[in-house]
């Protein structure tokens, strides 16, 4: 019998806490998901749902925040509590991250060539000359026109889309097993967005890189991901295979997100249907289900008790009291969680 290998990344019941003037709050409260080798997993949710905090936590990049409990396993190896040096090494060798705004991660004082060369030589000892040649090659791979010349350009001399291509090239310097891309196309227009997404897809196909793609856009999820994790107010509210979730969303929040995707039939003069209201901040999370004040299916219990995440079949789970009375919900196992103050 073969023993199944653990997923590349396994996040279990992760809680992230930030100090605030009124006491610590949990920006992420019990998040679990996995990413297997070569897979694309999208994390989707509105602004403030905890997507960035969850991904920064994986790499120990939380600033004043900390992981208060939970576990992050990379090939079975625990990263929570790992030393700075170990995390720094992993960031170089196994996990790379692309941020939303390339200008905030590129250094304006150095040419993009210098930044690529620096990144290459941190991971692997090589001469400057070899690193420069490799930098040009990487810029060509990510589709930057005229890479021999552009390698000498400063970040401000490139367009937003070109800067984001450079970020992808820097991420590729370490041949990561996992690439985390936090809203990599939000700052770009739709044509450039499509090109960058295509670049990520090609990279993944050619290198087998696993991709954790953070987005607020269900259309990007549909186009890119194998599985999707839907987050709301610091919690996972639904996860499953993309085709299942898009075809038949089980959680009212997921339904509302999908309904907000414009279709060709959506009249242009009509404002995009958005979900009324806002995601609560962690300190203001309402009692009961965190989505209940905005939920079209709300009933009494929702404002009192917090629903658990119901396992609905092998690859699907949703956090909603509706599943308690649904035929599939009654046979569902529930994933128990400990409710912590926050
Ligand atoms: N340093 C911090 N101190 C206190 N609270 C924070 C801190 N960083 C994030 N938060 C809070 O954690 C919650 C989740 O933030 P996060 O940045 O993860 O949202 P997001 O889902 O990535 O949103 P967006 O789509 O806008 O990027 C927010 O309510 C935010 O205010
Ligand atoms: Mg974010």
Image (spheres, rainbow, N blue to C red):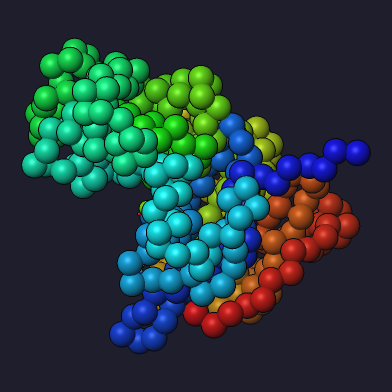
Q: Is residue 266 left or right of residue 293?
A: left
Image x and y of residue 139, in percent:
27, 21
- Residue 167 lies in quadrant: top left
Image x and y of residue 65, in percent:
39, 71
Quadrant that contains the N terminus:
top right
Furthest-right residue in this view? 1
Image x and y of residue 151, in percent:
17, 23
* Residue 127, placed above or below residue 89: above
* Residue 138, placed above or below residue 274: above
Q: Is residue 236 left or right of residue 190?
A: right
Q: Residue at x 35, y 26 (%)?
A: 196
Q: Is residue 72 left or right of residue 99?
A: right
Q: Residue at x 63, y 61 (%)?
A: 12
Q: Can residue 38 be spotted in the picture?
A: yes
Q: Can residue 186 be spotted in the picture?
A: no
Image x and y of residue 60, in percent:
42, 61
Q: Nearer the viewer, residue 192 or 297?
A: 192
**Where is ligand 1, by quadrant?**
bottom left
Q: Nearer the viewer, residue 305 or 183?
A: 183
Q: Residue at x 44, y 56 (%)?
A: 87
Q: Residue at x 13, y 33 (%)?
A: 111
């Amino acid at each position: 019998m073969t023993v199944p290998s653990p997923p590349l990344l396994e996040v279990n019941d992760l809680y992230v806490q930030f100090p605030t003037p009124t006491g610590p709050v949990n920006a992420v409260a019990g998040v679990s998901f996995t990413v297997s080798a070569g897979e694309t997993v999208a994390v989707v949710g509105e602004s403030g749902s905890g997507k960035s905090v969850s991904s920064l936590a994986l790499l120990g990049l939380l600033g004043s925040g900390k992981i208060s409990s939970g576990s992050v396993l990379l090939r079975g190896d625990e990263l929570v509590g790992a030393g700075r040096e170990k995390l720094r090494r992993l960031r170089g060798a196994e996990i790379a991250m692309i941020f939303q705004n390339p200008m905030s991660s590129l250094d304006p004082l150095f040419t993009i060539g210098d930044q690529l060369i620096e990144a290459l030589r941190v991971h692997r000892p090589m001469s400057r000359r070899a690193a420069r040649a490799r930098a040009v090659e990487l810029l060509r791979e990510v589709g930057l026109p005229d890479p021999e010349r552009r390698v000498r350009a400063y970040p401000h001399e490139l367009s937003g889309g070109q800067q984001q291509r450079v970020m992808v090239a820097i991420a590729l310097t370490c041949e990561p097993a996992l690439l985390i891309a936090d809203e990599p196309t939000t700052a770009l227009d739709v044509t450039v967005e499509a090109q960058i997404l295509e670049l990520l897809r090609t990279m993944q196909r050619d290198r087998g890189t696993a991709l954790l793609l953070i987005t607020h856009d269900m259309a990007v999820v549909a186009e890119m991901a194998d599985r999707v994790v839907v987050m709301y107010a610091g919690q996972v509210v639904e996860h499953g295979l993309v085709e299942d979730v898009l075809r038949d969303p089980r959680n009212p929040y997921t339904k509302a997100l999908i309904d907000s995707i414009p279709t060709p039939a959506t009249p242009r003069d009509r404002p995009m249907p958005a979900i009324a209201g806002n995601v609560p901040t962690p300190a203001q999370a309402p009692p009961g289900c965190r989505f209940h004040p905005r939920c079209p299916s709300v009933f009494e219990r929702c404002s009192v008790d917090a629903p658990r995440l119901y396992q609905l079949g092998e690859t699907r789970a949703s956090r909603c009291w509706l599943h308690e009375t649904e035929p599939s919900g009654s046979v569902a196992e529930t994933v128990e969680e400990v409710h912590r103050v926050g």
